Image: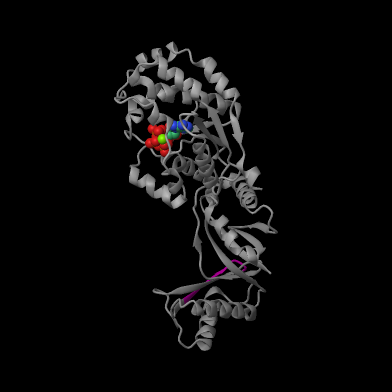
Amino acid sequence: MDILFLIKYGEISLKGENKKIFLNQLRKNIKARLRGMQTTLTIKPGRFYLTAPAEHEAEVRDVLSNTFGIIGFSKALQVKKTIESIEEAALILAEDLLKKGRGNLFKIDVRRTDKSFPMDSYGIACRLGDILCEKFPQLTVNLKNADWRINVEVRDTTYLYADTEIGRGGLPVHCAGKGLLLLSGGIDSPVAGYLMAKRGLFIEAIYFHTPPFTSGDVKEKLKTLTMSLSQYIPYINLLVVPFTKAQLLIKEKAKKDEVTLLSRAAMMSISHAVAEKRKAACLITGESLSQVASQTVESIRFTGSYTTFPVFRPLIGMDKNEIIRIAEQIGTYKTSILPYPDCCTLFAPRYPLIKPDFGKMKKSFDALQLPPLLEEAIENIEDIQLWKEES
Ligand code: ATP
Ligand code: MG
């Protein structure tokens, strides 16, 4: 047996001429997450309708709650456009709600876009109210403080539903193009990627790996984080950059207090080249102003000067607790806090520069003559496509 979901989209409805592009992308994204499942997905004014096999209900709910662009969805009944069929469906829904102990105060909301239907919205609502109270005498209509409500939509056909689950909102991934996320194993960067994907960016993740100083387990951790993000960003992949040679050269040749900033600049420079190669239009980092020495205004100016792409830092104005709350909510926190030696902490100077001088730092970077090593690192990037392994 198939079940039906009615899906509501939010901001897309403001898109005017471009609305169709956004809707088609949303459709593709839902389909991508439900690949392998027998489903139909129809776009109608203001709504999507999805049918799926009943045995996959939990999976479908999970996908709909994690797909950007959806503000809400409801499991619905579709019935013939006759008052008798509508009554019958309303009784089924009410019985189910009563079984779940949802209370005795209720209301009926009717939306009638098909004006040819012989009863008006008020008439349908009154009729259903009467029928339900007759069948279940414990029920009382209460428009202001209802425990539950039944929604009726009379359109090309009729839909009835009770509860609406809240979606994540935002815009469908891909609508805003592609961004390259600098994903470290920490708490912040997965949250940054999530927030930018919510604004419609498709994301590829890039991780700078420094074995043997960071163990192979770190790579597994990064894979797990990427998999967590793939709930929201279908087909996200992970690029692993062998960064040890560059990191060692910086450690060996640079002034101690400049090491972190120079490594960050090298990462930015590689990320720029990779973004160009892979046709991404922006970079994303998990930086938050003043969180650590490398995230002061002066430090960010220096590291950010190694790319001409816009660098999005959606966490810049958030404090750690806010970021942690989102990380918990999106399911990355538990993985992020797994202990592992981070190259940035391993190579970090005891007293890093907090207010670096821009000109001096540029000279220090040039003196290292890093480009050949950076090019070598780019050539040896490992492209991990976890979704392929999954399917
Ligand atoms: P997080 O580790 O969650 O990113 P953090 O507070 O540890 O947060 P930093 O280590 O200062 O942040 O790094 C700042 C940003 O630089 C990160 O959010 C990430 O975008 C990027 N970054 C740092 N290290 C790496 C790495 N090894 N690979 C990829 N990106 C990195
Ligand atoms: Mg980190």
Q: Provide residue 292's location: percent of width, then percent of height.
A: 33, 32
Among the 4 quarters of the image, the one containing residue 60: bottom right
Q: Provide residue 367's location: percent of width, then percent of height.
A: 43, 11
| Residue visible at 41% across and 16% down in the picture | 252
**Nearer the observer, 368 or 76:** 368
Q: Is residue 112 magenta?
A: yes
Among the 4 quarters of the image, the one containing residue 387: top right
**Nearer the observer, 210 or 90:** 210
Q: Provide residue 90's location: percent of width, then percent of height.
A: 57, 78
Q: Is residue 330 left or right of residue 290?
A: right
Query: 119 above or below 180?
Result: below
Residues drawn in magenta: 107-114
Query: 103 above or below 15?
Result: below
**Nearer the observer, 357 or 12:** 357
Q: Is residue 301 left or right of residue 129?
A: left
The answer to whether residue 308 of the structure is visible from this angle is no
Q: Is residue 239 magenta?
A: no
